[in-house]
Amino acid sequence: MRIIKLSELYSGMILGRDIEYKNVLLFPQYTVLTDSKINELKSLVSDCEIDDNLWVLDLAELKPVILRESYITHHYIDFVISLMRQVFSAILKPDVDFDKLSLMIRSSLLNDRQLLYEALMLRNSHCYTFEHSLNVALYSLVIGLKMKLSTDELQDLLVGSLLHDIGKMNISNSILNKNSSLTKSEFQAIKQHPNYGVELTDGVDCVSDRVVKIIQQHHEKLDGTGYPYGLSDDRVDELSRIVTVSDIFDAVVSSRSYHERRPVKFGIDIIKGDAEKQKIDKTDVDILVSQLVILPVNSIVLLSNEKTGVVVEDCDDMNPKVLIYDSNEICDLGRRRDIHVQKVIR
């Protein structure tokens, strides 16, 4: 356990001790902190004169706590699912059964504490990689459910998605977070993370042979141009193909150190292009695309009349309802055929 300043907290950290004020328990030990809880703590520090030096758990202490305590397990799973719900509400269509997905995730993490521990380690070591892995798991399960995969296959798909990038824990953050082009040696280091992932998960109970394939093959391409082994066609496992599609899509639309968040339409164009080049599985791409909201609420667009605005209603095509900034009027592009979306800004 260690002490850190309140200003150094970030969502996903775990309190090492109870926080009390005048004998009232405000935050119990093992609370998984979210942004809202951190803001509550900041308010309490100023209003109640609570010490802003807080105890948090070190990584080395997390494993025995997880295996011993159920409180932290439930709260961390709630935190994980709340993050995934953000992706669901922003990008995926509402007809996707999120409750079924969250139940599957909750069940898997509750039944396999080692998987939960690996997720905790990834969250604390590489924040982007952790959140990216959650998104990939959600997209992959959407594809898997539509393909009517068996329960065992869905379980392997979930675990493989959550752990697909865990090998990046063996790569320096200075490389992972670099905002300029990688050198040849740095890219070679990145290309080893699938193999590092296999090594890190060796002996973990939830890691089946198919999960190993997902971890090792999620950067392979059907045309043999991927890495680390240049596999092609039937040598790439079906579950690995699903994760590859999800991985590429989320990497494109998420904010990274080297590029801003990109529109869903941009991500769709990328994976459709790769499918046409026979690099990734077209069926998996078509399923994922069919479940995406092309222009989610709050997307900022530039119209053909040079006006900008914000999408006010989820749209499955390029004709949304747009609140025009300078006039504060709503323009329904489904009715206005003289105006169209020229560019999605964000």
Image (cartoon, helix red, strand yellow):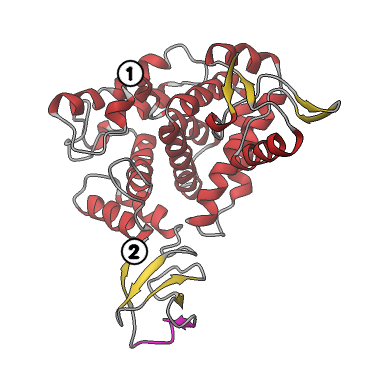
**Image coords of residue 231 (percent x, y):** 21, 30
Task: Say if 89 sits above or below 228 in the image.
Answer: below
Q: Depth-wise, is mark 1 or mark 2 nearer the camera?
A: 2
- For this view, does 265 lie left or right of residue 94? left
In the image, what residue occupies the spot 17% across and 35% down?
224
In the image, what residue occupies the spot 55% across and 15% down?
58
Give the magenta part as a residue range: 329-337
Q: Which of the two labelled residues, at mark 1 and mark 2, occupies the earlier sequence position? A: 1
In the image, what residue occupies the spot 22% across and 54% down?
276
Task: Say if 57 sits above or below 24 in the image.
Answer: above
User: Which amino acid, by three-letter code, is at mark 1?
Assistant: Tyr
The residue closer to the viewer here, 119 or 30, is 30
Does dot 1 land on a helix, a strand or a loop? Answer: helix
Task: Say if 110 sits above or below 79 in the image.
Answer: above
User: Which amino acid, by three-letter code, is at mark 2?
Assistant: Ile
The residue closer to the viewer here, 115 or 174, is 174
Does dot 2 land on a helix, a strand or a loop? Answer: loop
**Image coords of residue 282 (percent x, y):** 30, 51
- Callout 2: 10 Å neighbours few (<14), some, many (20+)? some
Q: CA distance from mark 1 to mark 2?
A: 37 Å
Asked if residue 283 lies in the magenta stretch, the reply is no
Q: Quadrant of the N terminus?
A: top right
Is there a contact, CB below 8 Å, between mark 1 and mark 2?
Answer: no
Q: Residue furthest left?
A: 184
**Image coords of residue 51 (percent x, y):** 68, 26
**Image coords of residue 90 (percent x, y):** 50, 56
Residue that numbered label 2 is attached to: 345
Residue that numbered label 1 is attached to: 196
The quadrant holding residue 68 is top right
The quadrant holding residue 77 is top right
